[in-house]
């Protein structure tokens, strides 16, 4: 049984339903803050479709390469998000992110600064990042009590179950607090394979597991993945950060139906 993480009053890793995450992918700080503020209002409104946490895709921000502008945006966003936890992600171009000319060390320096100013409850880095950068980020997370999500993405395929299980194990071995895997299905059986690997990882590892199969064919993994141990699912409330994300209200409705079945 994975040890749950506490995130501003929410629990990641226990309960019957997954946490729902909405990505913030705007290019301007004002746009990102407006979306976060709207999500915070929804979170405080009974019956409203609301997320449990927000993912700030820093690489989508026009000013991601400017350290001082980025920190100003982070302060404003943290205030706008209210009680919603923030997962902060700065993807490299090779990982599907926007290219700001930052190598792994520079990306980790940006993330470490945001951690130090209290702007992140979780941060995400790919397991293929430079070992020194990954070590530095892990140490910063430990110093400040921030959860480290280590992720792997396959945008063109779904690996065999054994390889996917190895990806989850690698994240755990590297010191992740959460292990995440995203894959692209070619046939319906690929979604089943991901769910099998997720269930095995959830049973074997002492950290929360997160997985999703991308694209239209992968939508069932976003609705039923929690049945197999995936602890977070993503929904869009504006621009999506990955193919296959359902609109927030639709995902909430489908999760209610799944939980009632």
Image: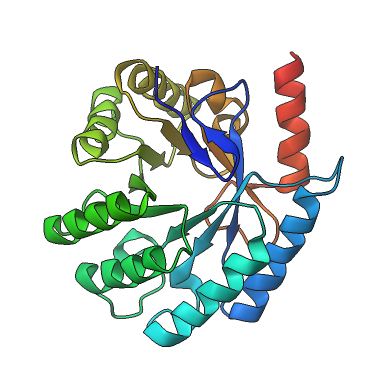
What is the number of callouts on the image? 0
Q: Is residue 37 left or right of residue 220?
A: right
Q: Nearer the viewer, residue 108 or 26?
A: 108
Where residue 114 sits: x, y (%)? 41, 68
Q: Nearer the viewer, residue 235 or 1?
A: 1
Residue 108 seen by the camera: yes
Q: Nearer the viewer, residue 214 or 179?
A: 179
120 is higher (above) or lower (below) than 216: below
245 is higher (above) or lower (below) than 188: below
Q: Is residue 107 left or right of residue 129?
A: right
Where residue 24 sits: x, y (%)? 59, 63
Residue 66 seen by the camera: no
Q: Which quadrant is the N terminus positioned in?
A: top left
**What's the residue at 59%, 42% (across, down)?**
216
Where residue 119 sits: x, y (%)? 48, 64
107 is higher (above) or lower (below) than 11: below
Q: Nearer the viewer, residue 192 or 119?
A: 119
Image quadrant assignment for residue 226: top right
**What's the residue at 74%, 13% (across, down)?**
261
167 is higher (above) or lower (below) than 249: above
Where residue 250 sits: x, y (%)? 76, 41
What colour scheme does the image use? rainbow
């Amino acid at each position: 049984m994975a040890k749950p993480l506490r995130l501003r009053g929410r629990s990641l890793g226990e309960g019957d339903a997954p946490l729902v995450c909405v990505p913030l992918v705007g290019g301007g700080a004002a746009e990102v803050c407006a979306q976060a503020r709207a999500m915070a209002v929804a979170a405080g409104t009974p019956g409203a479709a609301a997320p449990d946490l927000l993912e700030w895709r820093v690489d989508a921000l026009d000013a991601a390469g400017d350290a001082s502008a980025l920190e100003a945006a982070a302060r404003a966003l943290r205030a706008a998000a209210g009680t919603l936890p923030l997962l902060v992600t700065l993807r490299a171009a090779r990982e599907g992110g926007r290219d700001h000319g930052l190598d792994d060390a520079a990306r980790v320096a940006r993330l470490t600064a945001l951690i130090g100013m209290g702007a992140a409850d979780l941060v995400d880095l790919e397991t293929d990042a430079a070992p020194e950068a990954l070590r530095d980020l892990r140490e910063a997370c430990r110093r400040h009590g921030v959860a480290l999500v280590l992720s792997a993405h396959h945008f063109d395929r779904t690996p065999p179950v054994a390889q996917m299980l190895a990806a989850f194990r690698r994240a755990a071995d590297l010191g992740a607090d959460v292990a995440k895997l995203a894959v692209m299905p070619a046939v319906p059986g690929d979604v089943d394979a991901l769910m099998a690997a997720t269930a095995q990882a959830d049973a074997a590892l002492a950290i929360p597991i997160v997985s999703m199969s991308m694209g239209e064919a992968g939508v069932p993994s976003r609705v039923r993945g929690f049945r197999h141990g995936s602890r977070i699912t993503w929904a869009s409330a504006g621009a999506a950060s990955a193919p296959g994300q359902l609109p927030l209200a639709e995902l909430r409705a489908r999760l209610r139906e799944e939980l009632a079945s």
